[in-house]
C-alpha cells in the first residue's frame, strides 16, 4: 500500500479528478494549501528583495494498493501538466502506507482502501 500525495495548481483540480475517475481511482482527499516552489517570483521593493508570496495550490491524497501506484502517478502527471515544462505544475510524493483501517467495519490493509 502507498500514500500518493500530489500538489497541483488549483485550476487543474477538475481535470485531475475526472482523469482519476476514468482510471477507476475514485477515493481521494483534497485540501487547499498555500506554498512556493521554484517559481521565480522574487519582488524588489525599494531596492530590497522581498520574499515571494505563497501561491494557492491543491493537495490531493490517495491511498492505493501497489498495483494502482503507476496508474495513479501517470494519470496525475498527464492531467495536471499545463504545457511543455511549465514551472509550478506541481509535485507527486509516494510514501509507504503502513496500515489502513476502515472505521465502519474494522477491515485492515488493502481491502480497507
Image (tube, rainbow, N blue to C red):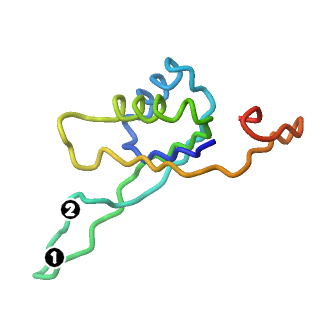
Q: Quadrant of the N terminus?
A: top right
- Asked if residue 106 lies left or right of residue 9, the reply is right
Residue at the (61%, 36%) spot, across then down: 64
The tag on residue 92 is none
Q: Is residue 1 above or below residue 51?
A: above
| Outermost right residue | 105
Disc 2 target residue: 41
| Rendering quarter of residue 14 | top left
Residue at the (48%, 54%) spot, across then down: 33
Q: x, y percentage for residue 92? A: 42, 46
Q: Quadrant of the C terminus?
A: top right
Residue at the (81%, 41%) spot, across then down: 108
Category of crowding for the residue at label 1, using alpha-carbon neighbours closer than 10 angstroms: few (below 14), some (14–19), many (at least 20): few
Disc 1 target residue: 45
| Rendering quarter of residue 102 | top right
Residue sitting nearer the eye, 22 or 111:
111
Amino acid at each position: 500500500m502507498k500514500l500518493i500525495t500530489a500538489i497541483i495548481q488549483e485550476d487543474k483540480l477538475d481535470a485531475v479528478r475526472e482523469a482519476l475517475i476514468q482510471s477507476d481511482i475514485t477515493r481521494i482527499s483534497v485540501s487547499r494549501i498555500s506554498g512556493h516552489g521554484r517559481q521565480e517570483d522574487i519582488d524588489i521593493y525599494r531596492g530590497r528583495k522581498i520574499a515571494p508570496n505563497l501561491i494557492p495550490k491543491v493537495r490531493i491524497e490517495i491511498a492505493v494498493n501497489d498495483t494502482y501506484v503507476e496508474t495513479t502517478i501517470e494519470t496525475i502527471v498527464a492531467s495536471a501538466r499545463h504545457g511543455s515544462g511549465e514551472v509550478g505544475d506541481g509535485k507527486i510524493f509516494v510514501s509507504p502506507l503502513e496500515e489502513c483501517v476502515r472505521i465502519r467495519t474494522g477491515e485492515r490493509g488493502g481491502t480497507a482502501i
